[in-house]
Image: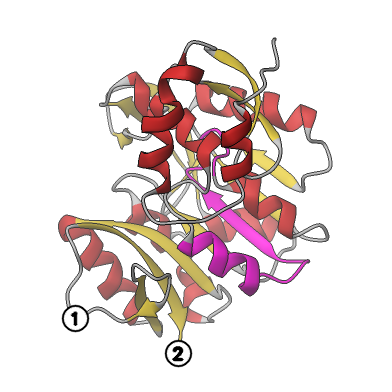
Amino acid sequence: MKTVSLPIPLTWIQPIDFQHKLGICERLFGKAISSEGICWVKTGSGISWKLDLANPTHRWIVYGKYEGAAFLNWAQKFLPTDAIIVDSGANIGQMLMYLAQWIPQGKILAFEPGNEAAKWLEECLTIHTSLPVEIIRAGLGASPAQLHLNNIGASIGHGAWNQISETEGEIIQIVSLADELANRSMTKVDLWKLDVEGYEIPALKGAESLLKEQRIKAIYAELIGNNGQQIRNYLAQFGYYCYLFDSHGKLYSPAQLPSHTNGLFILR
């Protein structure tokens, strides 16, 4: 597979964080790089990854920190070099390509139940064997089960709209986080990135013993609509408080949640 070079001005911009960066870069460079299609290309994380540059969401990975810089900047300061990270909904690795570089003595458990995304991620990790990542081809839930993964969105989302279903879609395995950690003799988690498209509450229930004992230091979860408030309420009973990042990358505690956001849950 070909490796492509980016426009020189884009390589200058990649390491720099600024507001609306992804949108600005798309207007400046999107058309120029989209014709390259599937290739190996240097990403905003500083390492090369297999991406489909005809896909706008893959181009965002080239431009800079996926879904914004605030969380990743916080995580880089927060994580010890031997951190244990759970990335549930790892997809093609758009977040772990950053996180894995910051924990050389640690490990990421990357849960990805979708066959296409897991194969893509595996291919990328064969090139980056030094990254401390273990791919687990399963989704997280309250207990072991066999369910389905239903793709309800457009292909440009690289799996971002895959949802767990009782009856429709690709057959997948569901496991509990408590079991998977116990199988690896892991007793704590420094950071859990929880993005499982509406299946967050079952995933959290599969880690309830860990939450009760406060053995998970921080959780970064996607919060959408009523499900977002349910996640907030559920984690509050174990002492986890919800914070959002403002436009300057600072944490604040919201009175009400926006309809669609990502929340950082930390023990107070």
Q: Position of residue 140 (x, y in %)?
A: 47, 48
Instruction: Farthest residue to the front: give it.
Output: 9
For badge 2, the amino acid type reads: Arg
Q: In the rendered image, which quarter is residue 247 located in?
A: bottom left
The one of 85 and 184 positioned closer to us in this rendering: 85
Say if residue 96 shows up in the picture. yes
Residue tagged by mark 2?
268
Between the C-alphas of marks 1 and 2, the distance is 17 Å
Please identify, in this view, whether the residue under mark 1 or under mark 2 is nearer the observer. Answer: 1
Crowd tier of the residue under label 1, counting other residues whose Cα lies within 10 Å: few below 14, some 14–19, many 20 or above: few
Q: Is residue 244 left or right of residue 136?
A: left
**Image vertical order of residue 138 relative to residue 80, above or below:** above
Instruction: Farthest residue to the bottom: give it.
Output: 268
The one of 2 and 26 positioned closer to us in this rendering: 26
Secondary structure beneath label 1? loop
Q: Position of residue 265 (x, y in %)?
A: 42, 73
Q: Position of residue 43 (x, y in %)?
A: 62, 36
Q: Which image quadrant: the C terminus? A: bottom left
Q: Is residue 159 left or right of residue 78?
A: left
Q: Is residue 82 left or right of residue 267?
A: right
Q: Is residue 97 left or right of residue 80?
A: left
Magenta-drawn segment: 70-94
**Image vertical order of residue 88 relative to residue 218, above or below:** above
**Image vertical order of residue 22 relative to residue 181, above or below:** above
Name the residue rendered at 29%, 66% in the picture.
Answer: 231
For badge 1, the amino acid type reads: Ala
Residue tagged by mark 1?
255
Name the residue rendered at 33%, 49% in the picture.
Answer: 199
Q: Position of residue 172 (x, y in %)?
A: 46, 30
Say if residue 172 shows up in the picture. no
